Image (cartoon, coloured by chain):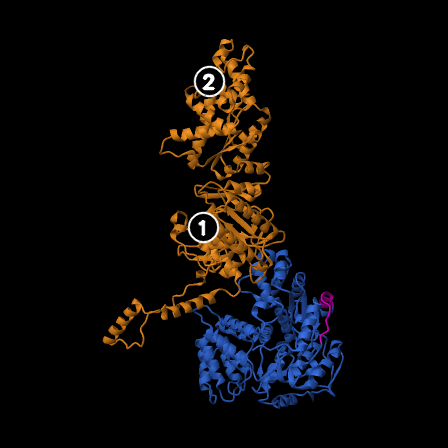
Amino acid sequence: MTTSLSKDLRESAEMVRSAMPCSAELPAGAGKTQTIAAIARVTAERGERALILTHTNAGVEALRRRLRAFGVSTASVRVETIASWSHALVRRYPVIAGLAAPPIPSWVDSERYYAGASKVAASDAVRRVLRSSYAFAVVDEYQDCTVGQHTLVLAIGAAVPVAVFGDRLQGLFDFGTNVPVRWETDVLASWPAVELPTRPWRWIGHNEALGQWLVDIRQCLIIGGLIDLKNAPVSWHPSDPRTRANICFGQPTNLGSVVAIGCLPHDCVNIAKYLNGSYTVMEELEGKFMLHFADTVDGGKPERVASSTLDFAKKCAANVTKTLDSAVAKKLATGKPVANLRRDGAAEALQALSRLLEDPSAERVRDALQIVSRLPGVRMYRHEAWHTVLQALAIASPTADASVRSAVEQIRNRVRVHGRAQAQRVISRPLLIKGLEYDHAVALDADVHSPTSLYVALTRARKTLTVISAQRTIRPAHRG
Amino acid sequence: MTWRLPANRVVCLVGPGDSTKTTILDAVALVLSPRWNVPFSDADFYGCDPSQPLVLQVVVGDLSDEMMRDDTFGLDLCGLTPDGELLDDPVDGAEPCVMLQLRVASDLEPEWTIVRPTSDDEGQPISARKRETFGLFRIDERVDAHLRWGRGSALSRLTAGGASDAITMAHRAARTAVFGANRSALHDAADTVAKAAASIGAAAFGELRPGLDPSVSSGSSALLLHDGAVPLTHAGLGTRRLTSIATQENVAGNGNILLIDEVESGLDPHRLLHVLQRLKTQTVAGRGQVILTTHAPLVVQALQAADISVVRSEAGVTTSVGVPDTLNEVQGALRACPAAVLARSVVVAEGKTEVGMARHLVRVWDAETGPDSVTAAALGVAIVDGVGITAPVRARIFQELGYPTALFIDNDDRTVDGDVVAAVDAGVTLVRWQYGNSTEDELASVLEFDGLCELLDLAVTVSDEEAVRDAIVSRLDKVTRPGVLDPQAWLDAGHSLDEIRSAIAAAAKRKAWFKREEPGQQLGDLVIRHWDRIGSSPVGGNLSRLRAFVYATGVAL
């Protein structure tokens, strides 16, 4: 079904179109995706095409959904991640790019793809290709661009007008060794700011006061000031472990999705364990935790596989140690069978773990994990990691030379492209939930976040926001 | 073959018959064909051997913005450097091009792909729809296709929304008409079947009757242009071809690739000139490319020299050489001797006398070689008029264009010596009289008394007796009275036969008695009749060399 464009959106779209080249900074939840889709729509109406680039596959999907809703045909817009578009350019023109890329992109080489694609986009022929193909280019989430990506977008900008969208306050990205673009210098120097009317779309019909408050505190966060929650439309609680758990337990059930937002990975795991499986941990995309275990299984050392299997189960589910205690773990680690130990209701599990000492195959590991998960009182809190590993163990096959590691990588890549399964109650971190929406959010330890991280944490919920911090006045930890 | 087209909008392929000009058009047309499928057979392979795949590649440059789009060819470009080198990528300084390949292996399934010049990559498949963007139109003996609303025809592309509605409606109407027809023998037959079916218990039909099979419906190519009630397929060939060309002109958005086989066919000279003019102005103004073939001297004359490419095929290898614009005076040579470039080999004769003489000699030689042997005409030998001092230059030009060329020239004009040397250096076979001699000098010098008398008789037929006599006698100081035209009288007056020969030659040259083709032919006849004496002379040696040239070129083929 095709939605018609509202007057507001059409005006915003036309504003950006006529201001190009330009940059637009929009707060979280202020309809960035729909504004970009609206630009594509008014462009398609004129029989022109637009190139839209963003960072993540999830972003591409969100844009495509919105474009479909606006009735923009795929022939009149091209939506890609910067990485996949760069890879395509390098593949087509390896001589100009000075780089031979494999047909299946290797994402660790992304920066090299950007450099190659920059050369391709700057060549006379491809400049003409861009001009013949597109009226302009739009780049979303520009605050997440590396300097390498920025160079590419500058090259595109030499061929067609460019509009970049982003929000400095959401500049959260796992850049690793790469240098992020600086909004004040890199962006504004190339693309003057266009001021779009700000409407907190995400909160309309849900909690408009919250939406407005989040717009109001932006300036304060940008300059690194204090956030006073006294009169804010949020419920505040002082931080201590018991309060944290009670607040999480007390979140509404069956009234939409809930996210509890921590800061560091192990904090999230710990509190999830403490919450006894009523929340599930969202895993980072690469899945180091799962890969680590996969490597051990691939290694095939019986005592290591056996003890790691128990350890993995303990790290994914609460109450495993109630039956499979440290004595069991110690015996397994030294290669001693545990089948003769007497633990209530755990005979089958002990047998399965013991069997790993003779046959540490992926299939047996899978059996053991499944049996452990059925022990009385065991409550899963890392479903995503657990299911990924079980699935990988099923796919892996020593005869077909398919390791557990490669199976995990394969599954994580699918998640990278298609997104995670939605859970009703999750524990996560700002980096992982940027761009996602929830009904209710609990910012656990709000005062340990950087300003950008805090802003992302505060802007996820559309209905209720609960903040837990030492003081009612929050001083963000450090500049992000 | 590899053929690099000259940088011209109009390219006219010339060359003798069977030099594979039409095959070149076929190849270009196949690669750029907008048809879904083209049937191939083993006969389409070199030597009928399908084990070696047939690979045709066409590089197209000067791409339109539509072709440059990333959803057309924008991400499949290769590059052509200014010095003609093809590169895999369209690097700066190289022209962006697209390289299409048609490959047919022994399964006879054509595969169209976009490839890169040096890459082993199998390339990107290219749909018939994308091939349509090249706007290929071919005008040949199957010209009627463009007068129909068939797939890929100019007419179809001109028709918004397609033509299938009309066909569907027509078919329904036809069904209705058959059902509504008066009772006929068809109905009697149907009744018989109905009765028989009922008697063996097949079925009790309600109304068994003749009707048109609804599944047999012709495509839109059954629709064709009519003038009033007359289908355009019944119009004259020229009209049909011109209408086709006119139709495709209207489809040209960003320029088409128009292939015209034997452009002159069906057209009278002034229509032909008009079409050529039109094609040139249309393509020069915009984009597009016209490749045509011709066997008509008029077409060669009407085009610029640079428009012409010479096609030759020897031992299975076809070459096509554009007429280089660096070749001086090539324009004049083509205008003056258009037949030369349509031949296999060329005899450039100095003037009308020599043309006439050569033509006659060749006719006699053809007859002498017997009914089973190949005639000079079959060998594709053209005898053209070099028009005096330009003859050596023209001979050199044709030789340089790849035509084996003989220069048949006299030897009394010192100003052309340099050009003659240049021609010989270029490989021209030289047939030239002895130093200082004109054709008249040369012939007179070898004729005996009776031969000289015949020469005078010949002169009389083009001039008149008194004038001939006066012109000769004025050059013989010992003859005091004109008397009659009688060489014996001049001998009697004390002149030597050589003096008389010189006087006749000088008079003939001065009065231009033989400077036309007809007398030239009669000189040839004279030579043949006195061959007994002439054969062993320098004249005979020269003419034997000419004979060897004319018939030897056939051996090379």
Dot 1 lies on which element? loop
Membership of A187 in magenta stretch: yes
What amino acid type should be assigned to the residue bearing mark 1? Answer: Glu
Specify whether residue A368 is in view: yes
Chain letter, orange: B
B26 and B110: which is toward the camera: B26
Q: Which residue is mark 1?
A: B141
Residue range of the region highlighted in magenta in the rendering? A185-196
What amino acid type should be assigned to the residue bearing mark 2? Answer: Cys
Q: With respect to residue A246, does B181 lie above or below?
A: above
Q: Residue furthest left?
A: B199
A471 and B146: which is toward the camera: B146
Chain letter, blue: A
Do callouts 1 and 2 mark residues in contact (Cβ within 8 Å)?
Answer: no
Provide the chain ID for the residue under circle 1.
Answer: B
Q: With respect to residue B496, does B185 lie above or below?
A: below
Q: Which residue is mark 2?
A: B453
The 10 Å Cα crowd at callout 2, few under 14, some 14 to 19, many 20 or more, is some
Query: What is the spatial separation of the Cα atoms under label 1 and label 2, in whole angstroms?
Result: 56 Å
- Which quadrant of the rendered structure holds the C terminus of chain B? top left
